Amino acid sequence: MRRRTQGGSALLEVALAMALMATCGMGLLSAQLALARHASASATRARAAFAVDALVETTLETGSPARDQWRARAAALVANGQVNLSHSQVTLSWTDLRDEAAAGRDCAGTSATEGGRACVALAFAQ
């Protein structure tokens, strides 16, 4: 009987396959985390738009107590929310994730992305 010498090529193939699978797994994990981040940012933007719309409606229809209540709610709905109410525009800005704030996006004439802030503004006529 003749003995074969083992070259170890199967072990190398398995190691390469495992490295490729690990790289693909990390890519999938990264994509899932990015999707979760974007979903959270979209939900925050939707809550902010709802709050600004409600604040405009109370400004147009009712008196000061309801408006003040919605100002407090709007600021509490988003992280570090700041509400600016003028005679014809409501702006709600909040702290956004660093990579979610698109460069050059303006809100109410000022740069909303300075310091990682995002905003929603709604103009109205009385």
Image: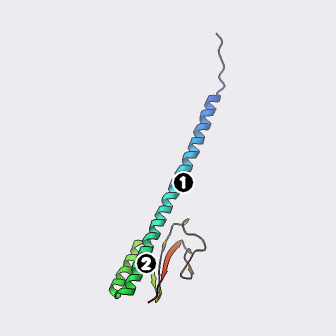
CA gap, disc 2 and disc 1? 31 Å
Q: Which residue is mark 2?
A: 52
Q: Nearer the viewer, residue 34 or 19?
A: 34
- Identify residue type, mark 2: Val
Query: In the rendered image, which quarter contains the C terminus?
Result: bottom left
Q: Classify residue 57 by image quadrant.
A: bottom left
Where residue 59 sits, quadrant-wise, is bottom left
Question: Looking at numbered disc 1 in the image, what kind of residue is underneath it?
Answer: Ala
Element type at mark 2: helix
Name the N-terminal-most of marks 2 and 1: 1
Q: How is the image coloured?
A: rainbow
Residue underneath mark 1? 31
| Front residue of 37 and 54 | 54
109 and 124: which one is in front?
Answer: 124
Query: Residue at image x 54%, y 76%?
Result: 112
x, y percentage for residue 111? 57, 78
Q: How many neighbours does mark 1 have within 10 angstroms: few (below 14), some (14-19), or many (20 or more)?
A: few
Position of the N terminus, as image quadrant, is: top right
Residue at x 42%, y 74% (from the top left corner): 50
Of tags 2 and 1, the one toward the viewer is 2
User: In what element is the residue under mark 1?
Assistant: helix
125, 36: nearer the viewer: 125
Q: Is residue 30 something one can see in this rendering?
A: yes
